[in-house]
Amino acid sequence: MEGLRRLRIALIIVILFVTYCSSSSSSSAPQEFQIINAERRIDLSSHIVNVFLTLKVENTGTVTASEVLLAFPPTQVDNVALVKASSVVGKKKKKTYVPLPVKPSTQPNGPNGAQLVSIFLKDPLNPGETVTLEVLLILTHTLEPFPAEISQSDSQLVYYRDSALILSPYLVKEQTTYIKTPSSKVESYTVVEPTNRVNTELKYGKYNDQAPYSYSPIIVHFENNHPFAVVEELLREVEISHWGSVQITEHYKLVHAGARHKGVFSRVEYQSRPSISGISSFKHLLLRLPPRVHSVYYRDGIGNISTSHLRVSAKKSELEIEPRYPLFGGWKATFVIGYGLPLQDFLFESSEGVRYLNFSFGCPLADTLVEKLTIKVVLPEGSKNASAVVPFPVEQHLETSYSYLDVVGRPVVVLEKKNVVPEHNIRFQVYYNFNPIFMLAEPLMLVSVFLLFFVACLAYLHVDLSIRKS
Ligand SMILES: *[C@@H]1O[C@H](CO)[C@@H](O)[C@H](O)[C@H]1NC(C)=O
Ligand SMILES: *[C@@H]1O[C@H](CO)[C@@H](O)[C@H](O)[C@H]1NC(C)=O
Ligand SMILES: *[C@@H]1O[C@H](CO)[C@@H](O)[C@H](O)[C@H]1NC(C)=O
Protein backbone atom coordinates (compact mmCIF):
# COMPACT_ATOMS: atom_id res chain seq x y z
CA MET A 1 0.00 0.00 0.00
CA GLU A 2 2.73 2.44 1.07
CA GLY A 3 4.68 1.70 -2.14
CA LEU A 4 1.64 2.43 -4.32
CA ARG A 5 1.05 5.75 -2.57
CA ARG A 6 4.62 6.79 -3.13
CA LEU A 7 4.36 5.83 -6.80
CA ARG A 8 1.22 7.94 -7.17
CA ILE A 9 2.87 10.99 -5.57
CA ALA A 10 5.90 10.52 -7.81
CA LEU A 11 3.62 10.34 -10.87
CA ILE A 12 1.79 13.54 -9.86
CA ILE A 13 5.12 15.30 -9.42
CA VAL A 14 6.25 14.17 -12.88
CA ILE A 15 2.97 15.33 -14.47
CA LEU A 16 3.17 18.71 -12.69
CA PHE A 17 6.77 19.10 -13.87
CA VAL A 18 5.88 18.27 -17.49
CA THR A 19 2.94 20.71 -17.55
CA TYR A 20 5.16 23.37 -15.95
CA CYS A 21 7.83 22.87 -18.60
CA SER A 22 5.38 22.98 -21.49
CA SER A 23 3.64 26.07 -20.12
CA SER A 24 6.95 27.88 -19.65
CA SER A 25 8.03 26.94 -23.16
CA SER A 26 4.79 28.29 -24.59
CA SER A 27 5.36 31.59 -22.80
CA SER A 28 8.70 31.85 -24.59
CA ALA A 29 6.97 31.55 -27.98
CA PRO A 30 8.43 34.21 -30.29
CA GLN A 31 7.31 37.72 -29.48
CA GLU A 32 5.91 39.36 -32.57
CA PHE A 33 5.58 43.04 -33.26
CA GLN A 34 4.94 45.35 -36.14
CA ILE A 35 5.62 49.05 -36.35
CA ILE A 36 2.46 50.90 -37.33
CA ASN A 37 4.18 54.25 -37.71
CA ALA A 38 7.79 55.37 -37.48
CA GLU A 39 9.23 58.86 -37.62
CA ARG A 40 12.95 59.54 -37.59
CA ARG A 41 14.58 62.96 -37.21
CA ILE A 42 18.32 63.12 -37.82
CA ASP A 43 20.09 66.26 -36.67
CA LEU A 44 23.39 66.86 -38.48
CA SER A 45 24.04 70.38 -37.22
CA SER A 46 26.97 69.46 -34.97
CA HIS A 47 29.71 66.81 -35.30
CA ILE A 48 27.83 64.62 -32.84
CA VAL A 49 24.77 63.24 -34.65
CA ASN A 50 21.45 63.00 -32.79
CA VAL A 51 18.73 60.67 -34.06
CA PHE A 52 15.23 60.89 -32.57
CA LEU A 53 12.99 57.92 -33.33
CA THR A 54 9.29 57.77 -32.56
CA LEU A 55 7.85 54.29 -33.00
CA LYS A 56 4.26 53.16 -32.61
CA VAL A 57 4.63 49.45 -31.90
CA GLU A 58 1.85 46.85 -31.99
CA ASN A 59 1.96 43.36 -30.50
CA THR A 60 0.80 41.11 -33.37
CA GLY A 61 1.69 37.86 -31.62
CA THR A 62 -0.43 35.55 -29.48
CA VAL A 63 1.40 36.11 -26.18
CA THR A 64 2.14 39.14 -24.05
CA ALA A 65 5.52 40.61 -24.92
CA SER A 66 7.84 43.15 -23.34
CA GLU A 67 11.09 43.15 -25.32
CA VAL A 68 11.18 45.42 -28.37
CA LEU A 69 14.25 45.19 -30.61
CA LEU A 70 16.16 47.91 -32.45
CA ALA A 71 18.59 47.03 -35.24
CA PHE A 72 21.87 48.74 -36.18
CA PRO A 73 23.94 48.19 -39.31
CA PRO A 74 27.38 46.74 -38.35
CA THR A 75 29.12 49.90 -39.63
CA GLN A 76 27.22 52.02 -37.13
CA VAL A 77 27.47 49.86 -34.02
CA ASP A 78 30.88 51.13 -32.85
CA ASN A 79 29.78 54.73 -33.26
CA VAL A 80 26.71 54.52 -31.05
CA ALA A 81 27.63 56.52 -27.96
CA LEU A 82 24.23 56.31 -26.31
CA VAL A 83 20.76 54.76 -26.74
CA LYS A 84 18.01 56.15 -24.54
CA ALA A 85 14.41 54.95 -24.70
CA SER A 86 11.17 55.92 -23.04
CA SER A 87 7.54 55.06 -23.50
CA VAL A 88 5.02 57.84 -23.97
CA VAL A 89 2.00 57.80 -21.69
CA GLY A 90 -0.99 60.09 -22.26
CA LYS A 91 -1.71 62.36 -25.17
CA LYS A 92 -0.87 65.86 -26.42
CA LYS A 93 -0.09 68.24 -23.55
CA LYS A 94 -0.42 65.61 -20.83
CA LYS A 95 2.33 63.40 -22.26
CA THR A 96 4.70 61.88 -19.76
CA TYR A 97 7.81 59.88 -20.53
CA VAL A 98 8.72 56.70 -18.68
CA PRO A 99 12.42 55.86 -19.07
CA LEU A 100 13.01 52.25 -20.12
CA PRO A 101 16.07 50.02 -19.72
CA VAL A 102 18.06 49.35 -22.90
CA LYS A 103 20.51 46.43 -23.18
CA PRO A 104 22.43 44.62 -25.91
CA SER A 105 20.16 41.82 -27.12
CA THR A 106 20.85 38.16 -26.42
CA GLN A 107 19.24 37.24 -29.78
CA PRO A 108 21.48 36.27 -32.71
CA ASN A 109 22.40 39.02 -35.19
CA GLY A 110 20.04 39.82 -38.06
CA PRO A 111 20.85 39.44 -41.79
CA ASN A 112 24.01 41.23 -43.05
CA GLY A 113 25.40 41.41 -39.51
CA ALA A 114 22.68 43.74 -38.21
CA GLN A 115 23.14 44.00 -34.44
CA LEU A 116 20.23 44.09 -32.05
CA VAL A 117 19.50 46.09 -28.92
CA SER A 118 16.57 45.33 -26.58
CA ILE A 119 14.21 47.84 -25.01
CA PHE A 120 12.31 46.42 -22.03
CA LEU A 121 8.77 47.74 -21.56
CA LYS A 122 7.58 48.58 -18.04
CA ASP A 123 4.12 47.08 -18.70
CA PRO A 124 4.13 44.01 -20.95
CA LEU A 125 2.05 44.48 -24.09
CA ASN A 126 -0.96 42.17 -24.60
CA PRO A 127 -1.74 40.83 -28.09
CA GLY A 128 -3.34 43.60 -30.18
CA GLU A 129 -2.18 46.43 -27.90
CA THR A 130 0.11 49.28 -28.98
CA VAL A 131 2.73 51.43 -27.28
CA THR A 132 4.55 54.58 -28.43
CA LEU A 133 8.30 54.61 -27.87
CA GLU A 134 10.70 57.52 -28.15
CA VAL A 135 14.33 56.64 -28.73
CA LEU A 136 17.36 58.91 -28.77
CA LEU A 137 20.51 57.65 -30.49
CA ILE A 138 23.74 59.57 -30.33
CA LEU A 139 26.28 58.75 -33.02
CA THR A 140 29.91 59.85 -33.14
CA HIS A 141 32.53 59.64 -35.91
CA THR A 142 29.79 59.41 -38.53
CA LEU A 143 30.54 62.57 -40.53
CA GLU A 144 33.41 62.11 -42.97
CA PRO A 145 35.08 65.32 -44.22
CA PHE A 146 35.22 65.36 -48.01
CA PRO A 147 37.47 66.79 -49.37
CA ALA A 148 39.63 65.47 -46.58
CA GLU A 149 41.99 68.49 -46.82
CA ILE A 150 40.99 72.13 -47.15
CA SER A 151 42.86 75.42 -47.15
CA GLN A 152 42.33 78.32 -44.79
CA SER A 153 39.74 80.03 -46.99
CA ASP A 154 37.62 76.91 -47.76
CA SER A 155 34.52 75.89 -45.96
CA GLN A 156 34.20 72.32 -44.71
CA LEU A 157 32.07 69.70 -46.50
CA VAL A 158 31.17 66.32 -45.06
CA TYR A 159 29.47 63.05 -46.03
CA TYR A 160 26.72 61.45 -43.99
CA ARG A 161 25.83 57.84 -44.82
CA ASP A 162 22.69 56.08 -43.67
CA SER A 163 19.62 54.27 -45.01
CA ALA A 164 16.48 55.96 -46.32
CA LEU A 165 14.54 53.15 -44.64
CA ILE A 166 14.75 52.60 -40.90
CA LEU A 167 16.55 49.32 -40.25
CA SER A 168 14.18 47.22 -38.15
CA PRO A 169 13.57 43.55 -37.37
CA TYR A 170 9.83 44.22 -37.79
CA LEU A 171 7.48 45.07 -40.63
CA VAL A 172 7.15 48.87 -40.81
CA LYS A 173 3.72 49.92 -42.09
CA GLU A 174 4.49 53.62 -42.50
CA GLN A 175 7.66 55.65 -42.07
CA THR A 176 9.22 59.05 -42.73
CA THR A 177 12.77 60.33 -42.16
CA TYR A 178 13.72 64.00 -41.81
CA ILE A 179 17.37 65.07 -42.03
CA LYS A 180 18.31 68.51 -40.75
CA THR A 181 21.50 70.04 -42.17
CA PRO A 182 23.31 73.00 -40.53
CA SER A 183 22.81 75.26 -43.57
CA SER A 184 21.00 75.07 -46.90
CA LYS A 185 24.32 74.38 -48.67
CA VAL A 186 23.79 70.76 -49.67
CA GLU A 187 26.07 69.61 -52.50
CA SER A 188 24.23 66.40 -53.27
CA TYR A 189 21.99 63.73 -51.80
CA THR A 190 20.71 60.31 -52.85
CA VAL A 191 17.13 60.30 -54.07
CA VAL A 192 14.86 57.44 -53.00
CA GLU A 193 11.43 58.48 -54.22
CA PRO A 194 9.64 60.28 -52.67
CA THR A 195 12.48 62.62 -51.54
CA ASN A 196 12.08 66.33 -50.91
CA ARG A 197 14.36 69.14 -49.84
CA VAL A 198 13.19 72.44 -48.41
CA ASN A 199 15.88 74.76 -47.06
CA THR A 200 17.77 72.89 -44.32
CA GLU A 201 15.41 69.91 -44.24
CA LEU A 202 15.61 66.79 -46.36
CA LYS A 203 12.60 64.48 -46.25
CA TYR A 204 12.65 60.78 -47.17
CA GLY A 205 9.24 59.13 -47.43
CA LYS A 206 6.55 58.41 -46.59
CA TYR A 207 7.32 54.75 -47.36
CA ASN A 208 4.71 52.06 -46.81
CA ASP A 209 4.86 48.37 -45.85
CA GLN A 210 8.61 47.77 -45.68
CA ALA A 211 9.62 44.18 -44.89
CA PRO A 212 11.85 43.45 -41.87
CA TYR A 213 15.51 44.46 -42.41
CA SER A 214 14.77 46.60 -45.49
CA TYR A 215 17.73 48.86 -46.25
CA SER A 216 18.32 51.53 -48.87
CA PRO A 217 21.71 53.30 -48.63
CA ILE A 218 21.89 57.08 -49.01
CA ILE A 219 24.69 59.66 -48.94
CA VAL A 220 24.22 63.33 -48.11
CA HIS A 221 27.10 65.71 -48.93
CA PHE A 222 26.74 69.06 -47.19
CA GLU A 223 28.49 72.01 -45.56
CA ASN A 224 29.24 71.76 -41.84
CA ASN A 225 31.54 74.39 -40.33
CA HIS A 226 30.76 73.43 -36.78
CA PRO A 227 33.95 73.12 -34.67
CA PHE A 228 34.80 69.41 -34.66
CA ALA A 229 36.23 69.49 -31.13
CA VAL A 230 37.32 66.03 -30.04
CA VAL A 231 39.21 65.25 -26.85
CA GLU A 232 41.31 62.20 -27.68
CA GLU A 233 42.15 61.68 -24.03
CA LEU A 234 40.87 63.31 -20.88
CA LEU A 235 42.14 62.49 -17.40
CA ARG A 236 40.15 64.01 -14.54
CA GLU A 237 41.62 63.73 -11.07
CA VAL A 238 39.20 64.43 -8.24
CA GLU A 239 40.92 64.65 -4.88
CA ILE A 240 38.86 64.73 -1.70
CA SER A 241 40.33 66.42 1.34
CA HIS A 242 38.26 66.22 4.50
CA TRP A 243 39.76 69.60 5.44
CA GLY A 244 37.17 71.33 3.26
CA SER A 245 37.73 71.06 -0.47
CA VAL A 246 37.55 68.92 -3.57
CA GLN A 247 40.47 69.64 -5.88
CA ILE A 248 40.03 68.87 -9.60
CA THR A 249 42.83 68.61 -12.16
CA GLU A 250 41.93 67.90 -15.77
CA HIS A 251 44.45 66.96 -18.48
CA TYR A 252 43.16 67.49 -22.02
CA LYS A 253 44.47 66.28 -25.38
CA LEU A 254 42.27 68.16 -27.80
CA VAL A 255 42.20 67.80 -31.58
CA HIS A 256 40.23 69.43 -34.39
CA ALA A 257 38.81 66.32 -36.07
CA GLY A 258 37.44 68.05 -39.17
CA ALA A 259 38.99 68.31 -42.66
CA ARG A 260 42.79 68.64 -42.37
CA HIS A 261 44.32 72.07 -42.90
CA LYS A 262 46.52 72.32 -45.98
CA GLY A 263 48.96 75.05 -46.99
CA VAL A 264 50.41 77.70 -44.72
CA PHE A 265 48.49 79.47 -41.99
CA SER A 266 48.22 83.23 -42.46
CA ARG A 267 47.42 85.04 -39.23
CA VAL A 268 46.98 88.32 -41.11
CA GLU A 269 44.28 86.83 -43.33
CA TYR A 270 42.74 85.05 -40.34
CA GLN A 271 42.42 88.29 -38.38
CA SER A 272 41.35 90.55 -41.22
CA ARG A 273 38.59 88.35 -42.67
CA PRO A 274 37.24 86.38 -39.69
CA SER A 275 33.91 85.54 -41.38
CA ILE A 276 35.48 83.55 -44.25
CA SER A 277 39.02 82.73 -43.20
CA GLY A 278 39.31 79.58 -41.12
CA ILE A 279 35.55 79.34 -40.81
CA SER A 280 35.68 75.75 -39.54
CA SER A 281 38.52 76.48 -37.07
CA PHE A 282 37.98 77.41 -33.46
CA LYS A 283 39.79 79.54 -30.95
CA HIS A 284 37.49 79.76 -27.92
CA LEU A 285 36.43 76.88 -25.73
CA LEU A 286 33.72 77.00 -23.12
CA LEU A 287 33.83 74.94 -19.93
CA ARG A 288 30.77 74.55 -17.73
CA LEU A 289 31.92 74.22 -14.13
CA PRO A 290 29.92 73.86 -10.92
CA PRO A 291 28.93 77.01 -8.98
CA ARG A 292 31.25 78.27 -6.21
CA VAL A 293 34.38 77.19 -8.06
CA HIS A 294 37.63 78.79 -6.85
CA SER A 295 41.41 78.86 -7.52
CA VAL A 296 40.97 78.25 -11.24
CA TYR A 297 44.07 77.92 -13.41
CA TYR A 298 44.71 77.05 -17.03
CA ARG A 299 48.16 76.11 -18.32
CA ASP A 300 49.83 74.28 -21.18
CA GLY A 301 53.34 72.93 -21.75
CA ILE A 302 54.80 76.46 -21.82
CA GLY A 303 53.15 77.83 -18.68
CA ASN A 304 50.08 79.61 -17.37
CA ILE A 305 47.79 81.14 -19.98
CA SER A 306 46.11 84.36 -18.95
CA THR A 307 43.50 84.50 -21.75
CA SER A 308 40.66 82.97 -19.84
CA HIS A 309 37.49 84.51 -18.46
CA LEU A 310 35.57 83.13 -15.53
CA ARG A 311 31.95 83.98 -14.83
CA VAL A 312 30.65 82.67 -11.52
CA SER A 313 26.98 82.74 -10.56
CA ALA A 314 24.84 81.01 -7.96
CA LYS A 315 23.71 78.32 -10.43
CA LYS A 316 26.78 77.66 -12.59
CA SER A 317 30.22 78.88 -13.53
CA GLU A 318 31.52 79.32 -17.05
CA LEU A 319 35.16 79.40 -17.98
CA GLU A 320 36.06 80.59 -21.45
CA ILE A 321 39.57 79.71 -22.51
CA GLU A 322 41.63 80.56 -25.55
CA PRO A 323 44.50 78.28 -26.59
CA ARG A 324 47.70 80.00 -27.80
CA TYR A 325 46.72 79.53 -31.46
CA PRO A 326 43.43 78.87 -33.28
CA LEU A 327 42.86 75.17 -34.03
CA PHE A 328 42.53 74.10 -37.67
CA GLY A 329 41.69 70.61 -38.95
CA GLY A 330 44.19 68.06 -37.63
CA TRP A 331 45.80 70.51 -35.16
CA LYS A 332 46.17 69.55 -31.52
CA ALA A 333 46.37 71.35 -28.19
CA THR A 334 47.36 69.89 -24.84
CA PHE A 335 46.47 71.74 -21.67
CA VAL A 336 45.61 71.38 -17.99
CA ILE A 337 42.78 73.01 -16.07
CA GLY A 338 42.56 72.97 -12.30
CA TYR A 339 40.01 74.23 -9.82
CA GLY A 340 38.76 73.80 -6.29
CA LEU A 341 35.20 73.22 -5.07
CA PRO A 342 33.64 73.43 -1.60
CA LEU A 343 33.49 69.99 -0.02
CA GLN A 344 29.97 70.35 1.39
CA ASP A 345 28.51 70.70 -2.15
CA PHE A 346 29.74 67.25 -3.20
CA LEU A 347 30.36 65.09 -0.15
CA PHE A 348 27.42 63.63 1.74
CA GLU A 349 26.65 60.94 4.27
CA SER A 350 24.07 58.25 3.54
CA SER A 351 21.53 57.15 6.15
CA GLU A 352 23.77 54.16 6.97
CA GLY A 353 26.60 56.52 7.86
CA VAL A 354 28.57 55.80 4.68
CA ARG A 355 30.26 58.83 3.10
CA TYR A 356 29.84 59.45 -0.59
CA LEU A 357 30.98 61.82 -3.29
CA ASN A 358 28.21 62.89 -5.69
CA PHE A 359 29.95 64.31 -8.75
CA SER A 360 29.31 64.84 -12.44
CA PHE A 361 30.67 62.34 -14.97
CA GLY A 362 31.70 63.47 -18.44
CA CYS A 363 33.61 66.44 -19.75
CA PRO A 364 33.00 70.09 -18.75
CA LEU A 365 33.87 71.26 -22.28
CA ALA A 366 30.62 72.12 -24.06
CA ASP A 367 29.64 70.24 -27.22
CA THR A 368 32.65 67.94 -27.23
CA LEU A 369 33.24 64.27 -27.82
CA VAL A 370 35.72 62.49 -25.53
CA GLU A 371 37.22 59.39 -27.10
CA LYS A 372 38.75 58.11 -23.88
CA LEU A 373 37.79 59.44 -20.48
CA THR A 374 39.50 58.40 -17.23
CA ILE A 375 38.24 59.67 -13.89
CA LYS A 376 40.40 59.09 -10.82
CA VAL A 377 38.74 59.77 -7.49
CA VAL A 378 41.45 60.04 -4.84
CA LEU A 379 39.95 59.32 -1.41
CA PRO A 380 41.47 60.47 1.89
CA GLU A 381 44.09 58.24 3.46
CA GLY A 382 42.51 55.58 5.64
CA SER A 383 39.31 55.24 3.59
CA LYS A 384 37.89 51.73 3.30
CA ASN A 385 35.37 49.81 1.17
CA ALA A 386 35.44 52.22 -1.78
CA SER A 387 32.90 51.52 -4.53
CA ALA A 388 31.48 53.54 -7.40
CA VAL A 389 27.90 53.70 -8.71
CA VAL A 390 27.62 54.94 -12.29
CA PRO A 391 24.28 54.96 -14.18
CA PHE A 392 25.78 53.42 -17.35
CA PRO A 393 28.42 50.73 -18.01
CA VAL A 394 32.01 51.83 -17.32
CA GLU A 395 35.23 49.97 -16.57
CA GLN A 396 36.38 50.39 -13.00
CA HIS A 397 39.24 49.33 -10.75
CA LEU A 398 41.07 50.42 -7.60
CA GLU A 399 44.59 51.84 -7.23
CA THR A 400 46.65 53.32 -4.40
CA SER A 401 48.41 56.66 -4.66
CA TYR A 402 50.94 58.30 -2.36
CA SER A 403 51.44 61.99 -1.73
CA TYR A 404 53.28 63.99 0.98
CA LEU A 405 53.06 62.52 4.45
CA ASP A 406 51.05 59.49 3.34
CA VAL A 407 51.88 56.29 5.15
CA VAL A 408 49.42 53.67 3.90
CA GLY A 409 48.53 55.54 0.66
CA ARG A 410 45.19 56.80 -0.61
CA PRO A 411 42.66 54.51 -2.30
CA VAL A 412 41.91 55.68 -5.84
CA VAL A 413 38.74 54.66 -7.69
CA VAL A 414 39.48 54.63 -11.42
CA LEU A 415 36.60 54.83 -13.93
CA GLU A 416 37.15 54.53 -17.67
CA LYS A 417 34.78 55.01 -20.58
CA LYS A 418 35.16 55.39 -24.33
CA ASN A 419 33.02 57.59 -26.58
CA VAL A 420 31.68 60.04 -24.00
CA VAL A 421 29.18 62.69 -25.17
CA PRO A 422 27.61 65.64 -23.28
CA GLU A 423 24.59 63.44 -22.39
CA HIS A 424 26.93 61.47 -20.13
CA ASN A 425 27.31 64.50 -17.85
CA ILE A 426 25.19 62.96 -15.14
CA ARG A 427 25.99 62.36 -11.49
CA PHE A 428 27.85 59.31 -10.23
CA GLN A 429 28.64 58.34 -6.66
CA VAL A 430 31.69 56.97 -4.89
CA TYR A 431 30.85 55.43 -1.52
CA TYR A 432 33.46 54.78 1.20
CA ASN A 433 33.90 54.23 4.93
CA PHE A 434 36.14 56.59 6.83
CA ASN A 435 37.19 56.65 10.45
CA PRO A 436 37.62 60.33 11.52
CA ILE A 437 40.60 59.36 13.69
CA PHE A 438 42.61 59.26 10.42
CA MET A 439 42.09 62.99 10.05
CA LEU A 440 44.36 63.44 13.02
CA ALA A 441 47.11 61.25 11.56
CA GLU A 442 48.81 63.89 9.43
CA PRO A 443 48.65 66.79 11.93
CA LEU A 444 49.90 64.43 14.66
CA MET A 445 52.74 63.37 12.40
CA LEU A 446 53.66 67.00 11.71
CA VAL A 447 53.50 67.86 15.39
CA SER A 448 55.71 64.92 16.31
CA VAL A 449 58.20 65.83 13.56
CA PHE A 450 58.44 69.40 14.92
CA LEU A 451 58.69 68.08 18.46
CA LEU A 452 61.53 65.76 17.44
CA PHE A 453 63.25 68.64 15.66
CA PHE A 454 62.85 70.85 18.73
CA VAL A 455 64.23 68.16 21.02
CA ALA A 456 67.14 67.59 18.63
CA CYS A 457 67.90 71.34 18.60
CA LEU A 458 67.79 71.48 22.36
CA ALA A 459 70.09 68.50 22.61
CA TYR A 460 72.46 70.05 20.07
CA LEU A 461 72.54 73.40 21.87
CA HIS A 462 73.07 71.64 25.15
CA VAL A 463 75.99 69.63 23.79
CA ASP A 464 77.40 72.76 22.12
CA LEU A 465 77.31 74.74 25.37
CA SER A 466 78.91 71.99 27.38
CA ILE A 467 81.80 71.86 24.87
CA ARG A 468 82.43 75.63 25.16
CA LYS A 469 82.48 75.50 28.95
CA SER A 470 85.27 73.00 29.02
C1 LIG B 1 50.02 79.29 -12.55
O1 LIG B 1 48.87 79.67 -11.81
C2 LIG B 1 48.70 78.94 -10.60
C3 LIG B 1 47.40 79.35 -9.97
O2 LIG B 1 47.14 80.70 -10.10
C4 LIG B 1 49.89 79.25 -9.68
O3 LIG B 1 49.75 78.52 -8.47
C5 LIG B 1 51.17 78.84 -10.38
O4 LIG B 1 52.28 79.18 -9.59
C6 LIG B 1 51.30 79.53 -11.74
N1 LIG B 1 52.44 78.98 -12.44
C7 LIG B 1 53.24 79.71 -13.18
C8 LIG B 1 54.37 78.99 -13.86
O5 LIG B 1 53.10 80.92 -13.29
C1 LIG C 1 23.45 63.87 -6.51
O1 LIG C 1 23.24 65.23 -6.86
C2 LIG C 1 22.14 65.46 -7.72
C3 LIG C 1 22.14 66.93 -8.11
O2 LIG C 1 22.31 67.77 -7.01
C4 LIG C 1 20.85 65.05 -7.01
O3 LIG C 1 19.76 65.26 -7.88
C5 LIG C 1 20.96 63.57 -6.66
O4 LIG C 1 19.82 63.18 -5.93
C6 LIG C 1 22.22 63.32 -5.82
N1 LIG C 1 22.35 61.88 -5.63
C7 LIG C 1 22.53 61.33 -4.43
C8 LIG C 1 22.65 59.85 -4.38
O5 LIG C 1 22.60 62.01 -3.42
C1 LIG D 1 33.78 47.60 5.32
O1 LIG D 1 32.66 46.77 5.03
C2 LIG D 1 32.55 45.67 5.92
C3 LIG D 1 31.42 44.79 5.43
O2 LIG D 1 30.39 45.54 4.90
C4 LIG D 1 32.31 46.20 7.34
O3 LIG D 1 32.21 45.11 8.24
C5 LIG D 1 33.47 47.08 7.74
O4 LIG D 1 33.21 47.66 9.01
C6 LIG D 1 33.67 48.21 6.72
N1 LIG D 1 34.87 48.95 7.02
C7 LIG D 1 34.84 50.14 7.64
C8 LIG D 1 36.18 50.81 7.90
O5 LIG D 1 33.79 50.69 7.96
Image (cartoon, rainbow, N blue to C red):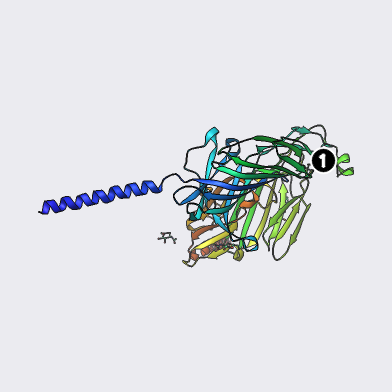
Q: Nearer the viewer, residue 182 or 69?
A: 69
- Dot 1, crowdedness within 10 Å: few (<14), some or many (≥20)? many
**Cβ(mark 1) to ligand 1 < 8 Å?**
no
x 14%, y 54%: residue? 5
Helix, strand or loop at label 1? It is loop
Q: Report x, y in % for residue 249.
A: 64, 52
Tell which residue pokes out farthest to the left in this image. Answer: 1
Q: Report x, y in % for residue 64.
A: 45, 52
Q: Quickly name the residue at label 1.
A: 278
Q: Report x, y in % for residue 328.
A: 77, 39
Task: Indicate left or right for 307 with 213 as reference.
Answer: right
Let me know if residue 18 appears in the view: yes
Q: Height in image: 469 above or below 413?
A: below
x 21%, y 49%: residue? 11
Tell which residue pokes out farthest to the bottom in this image. Answer: 351
x 58%, y 43%: residue? 172
Task: Quadrant for the C terminus, please.
Answer: bottom right
Q: Report x, y in % for residue 205.
A: 68, 42
Let me know if residue 390 appears in the view: no
The amino acid sitting under disc 1 is Gly
Task: Quadrant for the N terminus, please.
Answer: bottom left
